[in-house]
């Protein structure tokens, strides 16, 4: 029987629903919840979790008009906010299509406002906008001292409907919250007159949502938290979150190597005893970082197994000397949904000297097949070392 060669990412909408419930309970009534689903739902596949975010949040946020239109194609009827300014992103045709699809745009400059206004006039329509204010991150946003002029321009054009004012925090995930408090005050100095109007005032990302209730305002914008990961190691009040992704891949080959032998590009690992090694079809082209070479610990049937040698483009090698039953076709858990496991996203990101955000977004190559599961992840095929399923199309 041929060995299944697919890498499979199991995605749990139930985990996303659980996380959204935890966030809602945390922020309390009267605060809206915006689910950030850019980068194809942080690599989880928007189509996999659409029902969960549609029923568990008040609106969605994406990076580009194309992502917003994709959400509409998937049947989402609620409000959608595009984060990135339009300059250089989309042609006139896509902008017009987005306007007709009732999508809200972020304005960060007079040029943005002019672009959106012209498009609205050309279609005899109305453009819904949120103005982003740069309160200290020095990335996107209008400077505080220029905000009043932009607001006045928007207010005097009937083709523009101001729906929101927002900012973004640079250091909410850090242990020291003083910078975030400074940013919040700069934002409120401008936004306070618009409180208790039909204009939404929002600032909190996942980290601020978890740790800083004073930032919740009218709405919170949560990304990483809805997928089950703590925003950082410095959360003072972490929520009960469940990771929504687990990734596995099958063993392709098992062989025995003598003590003193080495393996991988550069022969970076030397075996200090006779060892059994197994080859797995996942590598850095699939988003599993090369920096995890000789560092990461994966699992077979919940038993740890070390990555040995340099991770290649499309494969890696593990030491299965202490797992006597390991054989061709057995599923290896690459990424665990258990936050205590050595191969949980948080730990792998730490070893790779990056952040969970980057890792989950990168693990989305064409060779990784996503499979939506109906319940929690621990009961999945391969969890107990089952042979890889060969019945998938």
Image (cartoon, helix red, strand yellow):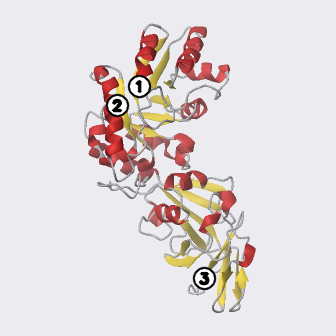
Q: x%, y% of residue 233?
A: 39, 58
Q: Nearer the viewer, mark 3 or mark 2?
A: 2
Q: Is residue 23 visible?
A: no
Residue 182 or 326: which is nearer the viewer? 182
Q: x%, y% of residue 318?
A: 63, 77
Q: Using the rendered view, name the quadrant where residue 310 is placed.
A: bottom right
> Disc 3 and disc 2: Cα gap in Å?
56 Å
Number of marks present in the image shown: 3
Figure quadrant of the N terminus: bottom right
Q: Which residue is mark 1?
A: 144
Q: Dot 1 surroundings within 10 Å: few (below 14), some, or many (20 or more)?
A: some
Q: Dot 2 surroundings within 10 Å: few (below 14), some, or many (20 or more)?
A: some
Q: Secondary structure at mark 2?
A: helix
Q: Using the rendered view, name the quadrant where residue 278 is placed.
A: bottom right
Q: Is residue 338 above or below residue 51?
A: below
| Mark 1 or mark 3, earlier in chain | 1
Q: Are marks 1 and 3 in contact (CB under 8 Å)?
A: no
Q: Is residue 97 above or below residue 228?
A: above
Q: x%, y% of residue 219?
A: 34, 34
Q: Using the rendered view, name the quadrant where residue 175 is placed.
A: bottom left
Q: Are marks 3 and 2 in contact (CB under 8 Å)?
A: no
Q: Is residue 91 above or below residue 63?
A: above
| Mark 2 or mark 1, earlier in chain | 1
């Amino acid at each position: 029987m041929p060995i299944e060669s697919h890498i499979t990412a199991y995605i749990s909408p139930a985990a996303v629903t659980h996380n959204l419930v935890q966030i809602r309970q945390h922020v309390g009534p009267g605060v809206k919840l915006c689910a950030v689903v850019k980068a194809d739902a942080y690599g989880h596949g928007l189509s996999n979790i659409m029902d969960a975010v549609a029923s568990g949040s008040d609106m969605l946020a994406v990076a580009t008009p194309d992502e917003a239109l994709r959400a509409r194609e998937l049947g989402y009827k609620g409000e959608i906010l595009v984060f990135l300014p339009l300059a250089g992103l989309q042609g006139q045709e896509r902008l017009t299509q987005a306007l007709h699809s009732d999508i809200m745009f972020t304005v960060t400059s007079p040029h943005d406002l002019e672009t959106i206004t012209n498009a609205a006039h050309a279609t005899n329509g109305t453009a819904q906008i949120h103005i982003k204010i740069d309160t200290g991150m020095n990335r996107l946003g209008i400077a505080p001292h220029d905000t009043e002029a932009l607001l006045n321009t928007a207010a005097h054009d009937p083709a523009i409907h101001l729906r929101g004012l927002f900012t973004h925090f640079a250091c909410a995930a850090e242990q020291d919250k003083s910078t975030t408090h400074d940013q919040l005050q700069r934002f409120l100095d401008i936004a306070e007159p618009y409180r208790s109007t039909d204009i939404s005032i929002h600032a909190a990302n996942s980290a601020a949502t978890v740790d800083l209730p004073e930032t919740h305002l009218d709405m919170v914008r949560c990304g990483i938290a809805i997928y089950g990961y703590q925003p950082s190691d410095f959360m003072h009040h972490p929520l009960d979150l469940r990771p929504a992704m687990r990734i596995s891949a099958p063993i392709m080959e098992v062989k025995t190597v003598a003590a003193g032998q080495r393996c991988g590009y550069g022969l970076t690992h030397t075996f200090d005893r006779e060892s059994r090694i197994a080859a797995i079809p996942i590598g850095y082209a699939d988003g599993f970082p090369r920096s995890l070479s000789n560092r990461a610990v994966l699992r077979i049937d919940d038993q740890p197994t070390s990555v040995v040698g340099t991770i290649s483009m499309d494969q890696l090698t593990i030491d299965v000397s202490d797992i006597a039953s390991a054989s061709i076709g057995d599923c290896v858990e690459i990424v665990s949904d258990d936050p205590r496991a050595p191969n949980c996203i948080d730990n792998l990101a730490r070893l790779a000297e990056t952040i969970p955000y980057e890792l989950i977004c990168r693990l989305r190559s064409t060779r990784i097949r996503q499979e939506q599961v109906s319940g929690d992840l621990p009961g999945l095929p391969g969890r107990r070392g089952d042979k890889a399923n060969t019945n998938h199309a």
